[in-house]
Image (cartoon, rainbow, N blue to C red):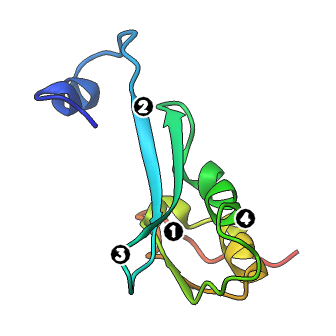
């Protein structure tokens, strides 16, 4: 969480050596129970932690859907979600382009 004015400084002023933490959480949409938690530094991208979050939910428990923001719009994230037989609900990034299958 950013303190008052920190986001503005980060966005509009030259980088200084400030560091902060990001808390990633996975919530059950029906029960509103927190199911997964991951604390990272500011240099870890959101998409890097999705697999770790899903791994915290036992494999024998069904995950119906995964709702995220556009930061998770990567092939790797979509594959991790598909591996759990879940439906990915991820908006495209602002600079999104169609993927080419290799």
Among numbered discs 1 and 4, the one appearing first in the sequence = 4
Residue most extreme to the left: 4
Nearer to us of marks 1 and 2 is: 2
| Residue 87 x, y percent position in the rendering | 59, 88
Using residue 53 as the reference point, say whether residue 42 is left or right of it. Answer: left
Spatial separation of the CA atoms under disc 1 and disc 4? 15 Å
Marks 1 & 3, CB-CB < 8 Å contact: no
User: Label 2 belongs to which residue?
Assistant: 21
Residue at the limit of the structure toward the top, as seen here: 17
In the image, residue 50 lies at what x, y percent? 62, 59
Q: Where is residue 77 in the image (x, y as percent from the top left)?
A: 66, 66
Quadrant where the N terminus lies?
A: top left
Disc 3: CA contacts within 10 A as few (<14), some (14-19) or many (>=20): few
Tell me if label 2 and label 3 are in contact, CB under 8 Å: no
Residue shown at 42% from the left, 66% from the top:
69
SS assignment at label 2: strand
Q: Which residue is drawn at 61% across and 84% down?
A: 63
Mark 1 vs mark 3: which is more N-terminal? 3
Of tags 1 and 4, which is closer to the observer? Answer: 4
Vertical placement of residue 27 versus 39, above or below: below
Query: Which residue is labeled 4 in the image?
Result: 76
The residues tagged by marks 1 and 3 sit, at their Cα atoms, a distance apart of: 31 Å
Residue 44's quadrant in the figure? Answer: top right
The dot on residue 96 is: 1
Q: Residue 32 carries which label?
A: 3
Which numbered disc, 2 or 3, marks the residue closer to the eye?
3
* Vertical side of 94 occupied by 7: above or below: above
20 horizontally vs 65: left or right? left
Q: Where is residue 64 in the image (x, y as percent from the top left)?
A: 57, 90
């Amino acid at each position: 969480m950013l303190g008052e004015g920190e986001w503005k400084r980060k966005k509009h002023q030259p980088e200084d050596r400030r560091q902060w933490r990001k808390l990633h959480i996975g919530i059950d949409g029906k029960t509103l129970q927190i199911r997964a938690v991951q604390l990272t530094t500011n240099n870890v991208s959101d998409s890097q932690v999705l697999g770790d979050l899903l791994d915290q939910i036992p494999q024998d428990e069904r995950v119906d859907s995964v709702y995220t923001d556009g930061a998770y719009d990567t092939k790797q994230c979509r594959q991790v979600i598909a591996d759990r037989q879940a439906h990915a609900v991820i908006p495209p990034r602002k600079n999104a382009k169609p993927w080419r299958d290799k």
